[in-house]
Amino acid sequence: MSTRFTRVDIIGATSAGLIVVFFCLLLLWRDPLVFWNDDYELSILPVFADVARSWSEGHFPLLSPYSWVCSNLAGEFQYGTFSIFINAAVVLIWKFPLTFSQQAAALSITHLFVLAAGTFLLARHRKFSSPLSIFVALVAALNGWIICWGASDWFGALGAFAWLPWAWWGLERALDRQQSRWRFLWPAPFIYLVVTGGFPYTVLMLVLLIAWLACRAVALRGGGSIKFATTNPSGGGPLVETKNLTLVLPMLGGVALGFGLSAPAWLAILDYVHGSARELQPADAHWQWIVPWRALPGFILPCWTVNWADFSARYLAHTATELTCGLVAPAALIAGFIWRPRMLIRRMKWELILLLVVLLLAMIPTAGVFRWSFRWLPLFHLVLALCAAEVLQLRPRSPTGSASVLLLILVTVPMPIFGIAGNYGPAVTWVYFQIAVIWAFCELFLPRMRLRAWAPPAVTFAVLLVTYFCIPPNCGVPKYNLDQQLLDPAPLDRQRLYLSIYPEAESNYRIEKKPAPVGQLARPGSTSMWAGLHFLNGYSPILPAGVAREFDFRIHGEINAHEAEYLVWAQSNSTGLLAQLGVDGLVVAWDSGLNPALGPDWEFVTSTGEGGIYHRIGPPLARVRSVTAIDSKPSEQFAAAIVSEIDDSRNYMTAEVDVPGGSGPALLTFSRPYFRGYEARLGNQKLRVDSYRSLFPIVEVPAGAHGKLMLVYRPPWLVLGGGLSILCAMIWLLGLGAAARTRFA
């Protein structure tokens, strides 16, 4: 029985994943660029191209040499630097000759498969039938927020949330006292994958879920296995109440192991958020993208259009596509409350509490470094699907189809009255009604139909598909025409460090304004990483680098216009700040409105319809330079050292240094962004690493010293987090070995 049950679950989980893959292929058939939007173009995909390059070169992708603003990939967190699964997926996908949009689709579909499979297992663990488990998987993996934001824009959200149902499943197994004493091992790897997936909001979801499970387990009446049905499965009334705190210790042990395994990831973001531009975000950011109460009917009919606060805190009409959940789930839950509300509350009170808490969190302002509360919606969709499946299992022959027709009527009637049908109201409403009526007809006139159990997943699949066919799933975020030419560095020079001056990408380079290919010169966001070009610019929502704060870079990589004028007009000479940074190339987009007015140190190289390129006269500046004076130490003079054999690697730099004796120390500047955690050694001698205004590292070398100087990035959080992760991995592997030995003894 155990073997057959496991085999059925594996086949079912795989089937759920393949159904989701088929769904995504249908979306790609209709629009090959459906997963290719906004941040995916300017940030996610070019960074992953650099990650694949880093692994091929034999380096851990901790830092990137191709962007100063987005240099610290671990500090950015969203790129899943410490996730084994994300790195493996990137390396594998980049082995194939795919276009940019195909790479994005492959990466998203891989994680959607994982999300659907994990949700199926979670549902099966709650004793749902296979059709209902597939129904839950479809809602979790294909709901509006996941498709419109996670899978096509903010990949970090999908990369982390894909493993949340797996973590939930592991946490429930750890709470099940019928499992072995090694049950604490179950949640650890999945918690690790959630945390390292790259989305802080999902970590908050995980913390909320752990607290909810712990409270529920303590209050649950359980004499045997921990189940999410609150009545005795045998039907003999409530089970004996046992409020034993030791019940949750295996789960908490697994949680501790999981967070220990992922220690480098969360220690990195804790270190880099402190003092970053993200910490100083404006107060109105906490009021943006909150789910308004007037939009709640969008869970039933996503063409429902009311005002939402967008990225600029402006209240604009917005179609509630991210609320799409396939109609069946809200219809089933509402029908269940009409049927027997008291019984449902008694059976599902904990799930309903979680559902309401998550919905409330999505509707109230955020706090601290978090913003955009609607990011709680994926968890809401998951819990909603589980609650709906519970109702459908309790009353498998309930007229849910008829209830969906009535709900659609109730929602549709006020739409023309209040003018909230939006641009897609007629088409979406008509198709929804057709599907609901067919469903209701089958329920009423074919009550004994053998395939009735498959109606919820079939209707959900059809409703979600027609929704994304009728309503563009990118929710109005920009699309850019970034083509494969960006893999070619020409006409830029890979040996030079560029500052690119361009206007706001989201309003100037989007397809509606520039349908032709863009970015070959300006390289907006982090697109310089595709061709291995060195830029100060880069896409960073956290902006941890000193250069990002000092020069007032914006999230999408553009520099503040006034700061650009100051740098180009006043700091571009041979002793100016740009030279100190090592900038020996300028890209000026015509749309920026800036006249470079460069002095005799620069020469015009070439131009296109996008902008012009300027190079500092002479060979590219060395990445390690000896300076005799620096304005941060105005009272000191330094000796001129001879620097040779420079090796500018990803996570370290080496150079042969020879300082003359008897003339004081030498001061070396390194042309790379400064982060806390750099260490310098000359042979066996450890040297102090300082920074110039937190922009780049500087190191004093004693008089008469000579030999190989190494500057290596080894921050305390990496050493501590790496050690903790290795320790937890050893504990987990030893526990796994002991569990296997016990089982087969």
Image (cartoon, rainbow, N blue to C red):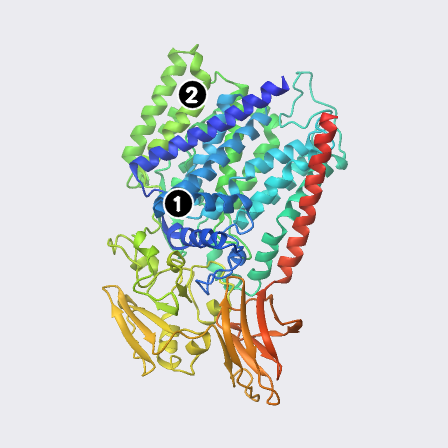
Tell me if residue 690 comes above or below residue 262 in the rendering.
Answer: below
Q: Secondary structure at mark 2?
A: helix
From the viewer's side, name the closer residue of 122 and 216. Answer: 122
Query: Distance between the Cα atoms at labels 1 and 2?
Result: 32 Å
Q: Which of the image's four quarters has the C terminus?
A: top right
Horizontal and vertical percent for residue 83?
Answer: 55, 47
Q: Which residue carries the number 2 mark? A: 455
Residue at the extreme top = 448
Image quadrant where residue 607 sits: bottom left
Q: State the residue position of label 1.
A: 104
* Tag nearer the camera, 1 or 2: 1
Q: Quadrant of residue 569?
A: bottom left
Provide residue 42's location: percent of width, then percent of height.
38, 55
Residue type pointed to by label 1? Ala
Q: In screen coordinates, is 280 left or right of 570?
A: right
Q: Answer whether residue 256 is visible to the viewer in this image.
A: no
Q: Could you say whether the residue bearing mark 1 is in a helix, strand or loop?
A: helix
Q: Looking at the picture, tell me which residue is in the foreground, 1 or 272.
A: 1
Whether residue 383 sits left or right of residue 400 in the image: it is: right
The three-letter amino acid code for the residue at tag 2 is Ala
In percent of the image, x 50 and y 17: which residue is there? 396
Q: Position of residue 236 (x, y in %)?
A: 69, 16
Other residues around mark 2 within 10 Å, as few (<14) / some (14–19) / many (≥20): some
